[in-house]
Image (cartoon, grey):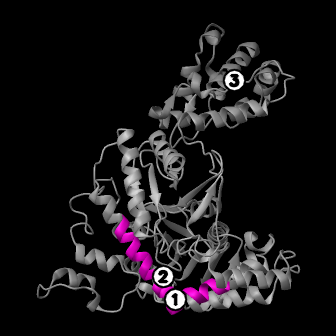
Amino acid sequence: MSLGLSKQLTRLQQVSQYQITKNYTTMPCPFLTKLTTAYVRNYGPTLLKTFGSQCPVMSHSISNMTPASQEQVEPDNVGTKKCPFLNEVPDMVKEASHEDIIELDSKPSNDVFQYDQFFHQQILKKKTDHSYRIFKKVNRLAGPGQFPKAVEYSWGERPITVWCSNDYLGMSCHPEVKKAVRTALDKYGAGAGGTRNISGNSIYHEKLENILAALHQKEGALLFTSCFVANDSTLFTLAKALPGCHIFSDEGNHASMIQGIRNSKVPKHIFRHNDPKHLEELLKSVDVNVPKIVAFETVHSMTGAVCPLEELCEIAHKYGALTFVDEVHAVGLYGNHGAGIGERDNQLHNMDIISGTLGKAFGNVGGYIAGSASLVDMIRSYAAGFIFTTSLPPTVLAGAVKAIEVLASEEGRELRARHQENVKYLRNTLLRHGFPVEHTPSHIIPIKIGNPQQCTQVSDMLIKQKGHYVQAINYPTVARGQEKLRLAPTPHHTKELMDLLVSDLQEIWINLGLPFTGLQCSKECNFCNKSILFDYFEARTRKCSNNIICDIPNCPQMVAAL
């Protein structure tokens, strides 16, 4: 009898391989799964004698089994009909399929993992789907009157015009900025010397942080080596520190924000791009007393869309959330002093945490956050991305200080006005020729192609044949099917240069057989069908309704704009 029960015990252990599935949870026998099959087979009688009476399945079998029935017990009968748990949940049982079982190779191999082969396969995937990146070899020129010219070396040395730089206003080659950098270089050297805590802090660091705080009307600011690090470190540190924190993230957020949110591993809620109503629906699902962060961008880097800043901030605060607002593609370009969309829309008071960059409109490198004194000090004290890295060098700090000063002055306001005029001229010229422009009120002009290979072809032909550098934007920077050219004209591109670009682009477009599908937005687009309101949204600064001209009494567009 002991031998028969031992076999039954072994079969019962096999039953534990049956999956009990609810919410993808496996619930095997809590005792047998701790033992190997060989152990059960060898020591079955001892196990039965010692523990059999304590098992609701085996105790019943021991008391009722006859020698004739010992060899006829099937796993299904034992597992599903006699187990008290399975009797309660019969519909939750399924037999483990082959896909559910992980089989280990019983033959050990002495072969070393082929790392290079693996790396080659990963790169081959990128090349197959045309998302593999080949960097253009471009040296931008910074001499007097040379911006936005450059020299390109990918196909031999040749002069080109750059149309895709994030140096939106040409501040990297502004004479006063270059002078400030040279002075700092001669006086303080090229490097920072260490982290902020170990010989890497200077009066330039503290001066620049004070200037940035004042620019955004905040109590404090903190410098990082890049805005990727600023976003990643700040969101991660805040989310981990706030007890029970939830993050609400715009689906179009930059990879740096996504990285910080993902690494924090706190509960996250993704709301539709620039959709205040969807954000409110999600916020309602979390208690108002739970710490929350709502993270989004003012100007989207690839589509050029501008967020409904006031609505998003008001809804976030209504439900007790902090706002984390990325102004990377707005600082220097909007507002009376270049503080971004927040300044232009008079919403700086509604923005709890602002992140920005020194590497785009300010023409240098580095990132920062601005907020309350206590928040900034907390991030300074806990964020690993700030603590454990070499600080920005004095040359960068001096150049950034001067660039911010210039863009906050009347010269900066004139640059922004010329910039807006050039963006409008190029956008309208492209539209007149039927190019598939995504019409947005920001300074970014996307031309949608929707095919990675064609997008790369247009970009390569423009630079090789015509001397225009317009970078192809493919996955993963944009979603598959959203591949585009991204134009960013500056105040220093002349109308003659813009006309030449459109003419050359039209020739290449025809040669490749691409369609001239025109404006890439729906007929109900608020901007395209409301030109007066579009001018309002496109403006770099906002003062009063006098900026909007309409002869219709009580024009609804003017009322909406106010």
On residue 411, which mark appears?
A: 1
Residue visible at 35% across and 92% down in the picture: 543
The answer to which of 212 and 485 lies nearer the viewer is: 485
Image height of 410 relative to 270, above or below:
below
Q: Position of residue 542 (x, y in %)?
A: 37, 87
Image height of 383 relative to 472, above or below:
below
The answer to which of 218 and 57 lies nearer the viewer is: 218
Neighbours of disc 1 within 10 Å: few (<14), some (14-19), many (20+): few
On residue 103, which mark appears?
A: 3
Cα distance, mark 1 to mark 2? 6 Å
Picture quadrant where residue 440 is located: bottom left
Cα distance, mark 1 to mark 3? 70 Å
Placement of the N terminus among the 4 image quadrants: top right
Magenta stretch in the rendered image: 401-426
The answer to which of 327 and 424 lies nearer the viewer is: 424
- In this image, 427 relative to 548: left or right? right
> What element does badge 3 sit on?
loop
Does the CB distance between marks 1 and 2 fall below 8 Å?
yes
414 magenta-colored: yes
> What element does badge 1 sit on?
helix
Say which of marks 1 and 3 sits in front: 1
On residue 499, which mark appears?
A: none
The answer to which of 5 and 22 lies nearer the viewer is: 22
Residue position for label 2 = 415
- In this image, 425 relative to 290: left or right? left
391 magenta-colored: no
